[in-house]
Amino acid sequence: MNLLIPKNSIYIVLFLLLSFSCKEKKNTTKVTSKTNEINIDNINIPVYNFNALEPLLYTDSNKTYIVNFWAMWCAPCVKELPYIQEYADKNPDIEVLLVSMDFIKDIETKLKPFLKERNITSKVVLLDDPDANTWIDKIDPNWSGAIPFTIIFNNKTRKFYERSFESLKDLEQQITEHF
């Protein structure tokens, strides 16, 4: 038995199949606003897009800030985190911000346990902004995008470090020399 299917019907069916199979699923858990926080065991990790993060990268005061871009999957980042935390503990007048480049879906299951396990108590935010080609240049046109990347600044001086700090002494030396 031969079944005759009009040619137009085949195209319509193919179009519908492709439309539904290629449709991007919306991630309803994605948060790109600085006002949303994820809280477990008193660890708050705000999720920022770059526009919300950018004001934290500048200051009008003479207070010194350390902003470190890092991720759990980055071995040099993980190695230097204890040095940054120790410096923050010894110098409460210095403001430290750790900008995680990890995935938003891993905050509860991986990032928070990682921070607890390593006793990282400095402020952590997660940067969730897919347009890295734009915001990397806004931070520093010389930055390749590699992490760890640290900005140390106040209202008079701004230094960029596209490398890891090898020790607490290394970090202290950079701050002493320039701030």
Image (cartoon, helix red, strand yellow):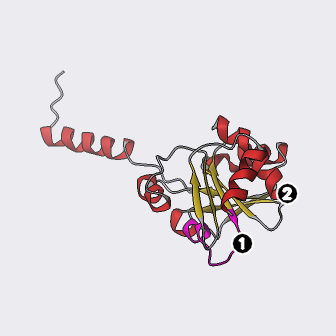
Q: Nearer the viewer, mark 2 or mark 1?
A: 1
Q: Residue at x 63, y 47 (%)?
A: 70
Residue where numbered disc 2 is placed: 89
Q: Determine the image quadrant of residue 154.
A: bottom right
Decide: marks 2, 1 in contact (CB < 8 A)? Answer: no
Q: Position of residue 87 (x, y in %)?
A: 80, 54
The Cα atoms of the two marked residues, 2 and 1, are separated by 16 Å
Q: Position of residue 75 (x, y in %)?
A: 66, 35
User: Is 80 located above or below residue 61 in the figure?
Assistant: above
Judge by depth and name the residue closer to the eye, 107 or 132: 132
Q: Residue at x 85, y 57 (%)?
A: 89
Part of the protein shown in magenta: 53-65
Q: Secondary structure at mark 2?
A: helix
Can you name the residue that lies furthest to the top here? Answer: 1
Judge by depth and name the residue closer to the eye, 167 or 5: 167
Q: Looking at the figure, which quarter contains the C terminus?
A: bottom right
Q: Position of residue 175 (x, y in %)?
A: 70, 57
Mark sitting earlier along the chain (2/1): 1
User: Would residue 124 be seen by someone viewing this image from the given angle?
Assistant: no
